[in-house]
């Protein structure tokens, strides 16, 4: 089959199921989260529409503050939708084909707007909204963004303090974020993680040829929140060689390269399925050379994932 034929008829590999019969990580759906998201988006539209409609009659800073508050509600609505199960709906545009002079043809999976990043942006916008609200109150204009009974200097001081705290936490989120890129080549797997060191973003890169991989497994990255455990998908690539210390991230070990799925735009089960299949079937790595290879990471429909979660117990 030629590359031209790929546009009309997918190969047997591309027609294969995109997800194992038993998904490693379940796709849960929470209707209450959807309702909360709709409510928050409605509040966002209401705030922004009111700010735009009254922009000519109110203090300029008041309009900016109202828009900022609306954006906070909007971002909170998006986070609510994602945590409720509405994520990985289509093949992301940040997954693309690539060519490397040494590693050959492949697919690049980049990072995207993760829930943590959206939360950090929401904190930043919320902090800006608090600061602008305090400035409006201190300016002595007739406009105010504070609730009735709190529209005084004491309320403005408290709001300003809250804004500074939110901006500080948002800054911590920005410093601790680790943009990750995963490339799957015909010759192996390449991972790049950028982290801030000495006020600069430095890249930690590692390439593992397929012949040096001894196994691929899936587990959970457990994060303690104080009240409960949050489990995030983690793919472990076992190798025959020891990873140099300067190339490791905290989730790595001597002979294990970790892929933190929540930092990537690919649906975790689909990514795991593709990596395992290419590892076990060397001849199928040639599919990465063909046009439309990015469709190998096209996620199953949301309905299909929800049905798989309901009918089969995920392996833990």
Image (cartoon, grey):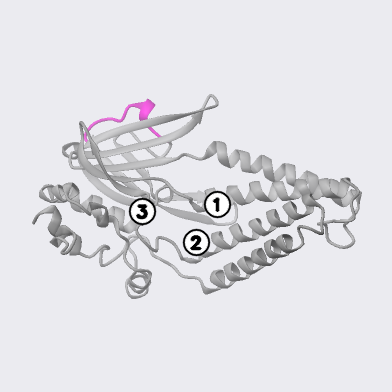
Residue 105, given in percent of the width and then of the height, sits at 20, 41
Residue visible at 19% across and 52% down in the picture: 291
**For mark 1, what is the residue?**
118
Mostly what secondary structure, the magenta segment? loop
Q: Quadrant of residue 297?
A: bottom left
Q: Residue at x 79, y 53 (%)?
A: 62
Question: Where, quadrant-wise, is the N terminus in this rendering?
Answer: bottom left
The answer to whether residue 252 shows anywhere in this view is yes
Question: Mark 2 touching mark 3, by CB under 8 A?
Answer: no
Residue 58 within the magenta-colored segment of the rendering: no
| Residue 82: mark | 2
- Report the side of 241 relative to 128 (left or right): left
Q: Residue at x 68, y 51 (%)?
A: 126
Q: Secondary structure at mark 2?
A: helix
Marking on residue 266: 3
139 shown above or below 87: above
Q: Residues within 10 Å of mark 2 (few under 14, many from 20)?
A: some
Label located before the other in sequence (1 or 2): 2
Label 1–label 2 contact, CB within 8 A: yes
Structural distance between the alpha carbons of marks 1 and 3: 17 Å
The residue lying toward the viewer, choosing from 311 and 109, is 109
**In the image, residue 245 lies in the stretch drawn in magenta:** yes
């Amino acid at each position: 089959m030629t590359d031209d034929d790929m546009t009309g008829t997918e190969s047997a590999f591309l027609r294969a199921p995109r997800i194992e019969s038993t998904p490693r990580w379940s796709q849960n759906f929470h209707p209450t989260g959807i309702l909360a998201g709709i409510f928050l988006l409605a509040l966002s539209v209401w705030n922004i529409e009111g700010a735009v409609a009254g922009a000519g009659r109110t203090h300029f800073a008041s309009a900016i503050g109202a828009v900022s508050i609306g954006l906070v509600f909007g971002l909170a609505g998006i986070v609510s939708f994602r945590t409720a199960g509405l994520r990985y709906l289509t093949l992301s545009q940040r997954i693309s084909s690539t060519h490397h002079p040494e590693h050959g043809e492949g697919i690049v999976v980049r990072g995207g707007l993760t829930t943590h990043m959206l939360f950090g942006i929401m904190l930043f916008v919320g902090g800006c909204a608090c600061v602008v609200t305090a400035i409006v109150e201190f300016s002595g204009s007739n406009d105010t963004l504070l609730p009735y009974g709190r529209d005084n200097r004491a309320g403005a001081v408290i709001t300003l303090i809250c804004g500074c705290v939110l901006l500080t936490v948002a800054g911590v989120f920005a410093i601790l974020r680790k943009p990750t890129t995963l490339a799957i080549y015909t010759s192996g797997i390449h991972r790049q993680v950028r982290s801030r060191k000495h006020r600069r973003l430095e890249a930690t890169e590692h390439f593992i040829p397929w012949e040096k991989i001894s196994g691929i497994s899936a587990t959970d990255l457990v994060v303690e929140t104080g009240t409960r455990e949050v489990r995030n998908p983690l793919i472990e690539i076992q190798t025959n060689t020891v990873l140099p210390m300067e190339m490791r991230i905290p989730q790595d070990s001597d002979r294990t390269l970790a892929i933190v799925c929540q930092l990537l735009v690919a649906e975790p089960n689909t990514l795991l399925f593709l990596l395992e299949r290419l590892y076990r079937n060397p001849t199928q790595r040639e599919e990465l050379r063909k046009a439309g290879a990015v469709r190998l990471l096209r996620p199953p429909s949301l309905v299909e994932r929800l049905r798989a979660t309901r009918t089969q117990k995920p392996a833990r």
